Image: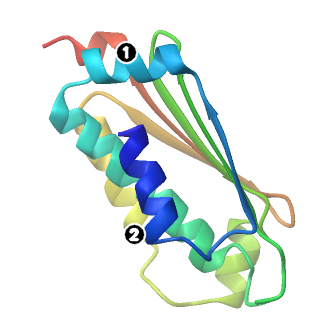
Amino acid sequence: MVVALRRALEHDFRDAFESVEWRVDESAVMRITRDVPPFVGEVVFAAAQEAIRNAARHGRGGDGARPLRLAIEAIWSGGLRVVIQDDGVGVAASSRIESEGTGSGLLFHSTMLAVVGGQMNVESAVGQGTSVVIQVPESALAV
C-alpha cells in the first residue's frame, strides 16, 4: 500500500506538489504487509489516493502560483493509521472558490472504510490546510 502511494505520487501527481514529505515507520510497513488483508489495504489505498487527489485539485484554491506541500504519515499504533496532510487553502475556502466535483469522494471512501471496520476524519481550517486521518484498528484486521 505504501509503495502504491509512492508510485501514485511519482506518476499521477508528479507535478501537483512542490514537496512531499514521507513519515513512514518501517515497522508499520512490515505490519501493513503482514497484517492488513489485501481488500482492506485496497480500501485504505483508495481513500488515501482520494485525499491526495483532493489536495492536488483544490489545495491551491484557484491560485495556480500558490505553493502546495503534502505530508504522508503511516504508522502502526493499535492498528493502521495513515495521515494525508496538505498546507493548502482548506476545505471551506476551496469549496467557495471551486465548484467542480460532487464532494462525495471522501464520503464514499469513509463509508467503505466503515465497512471494513475503519474510519476517516477530515480536519481543515481556512488558510491552514487539510488533514485526512484514516484509521483501521487492529481488531478490525483479524481475519
Q: Is residue 18 above or below residue 40?
A: below
Depth check, front residue: 4 or 88: 4
Q: Secondary structure at mark 1?
A: helix
Placement of 37 over or under 106, stated as above or below: above
Whichever of callouts 2 and 1 sits on the residue coming sooner in the sequence is: 1
Please state the horizontal and vertical placement of residue 124, each as a whole percent of the image. Answer: 72, 55
Q: Label 1, on which residue?
A: 31
Residue that appears at 76% across and 89% down: 64
As measured in the structure, the alpha-carbon distance from the residue carrying label 2 to the one carrying label 1 is: 31 Å
Q: Which mark is residue 134?
A: none
Looking at the rendered structure, which numbered label has been put on residue 104? 2
Residue at x-position 30% and y-position 10%: 139
Give the structural element (helix, strand or loop) at label 2: loop
Residue 72 visible in rendering: yes
At a point 29% along the width and 27% down the height, the residue shown is 117
Coordinates of residue 23 in the picture (x, y in percent): 65, 33
Point out residue 114 in the picture as x, y percentages from the top left corner: 30, 37
Does 15 sit left or right of 114 as displayed? Answer: right
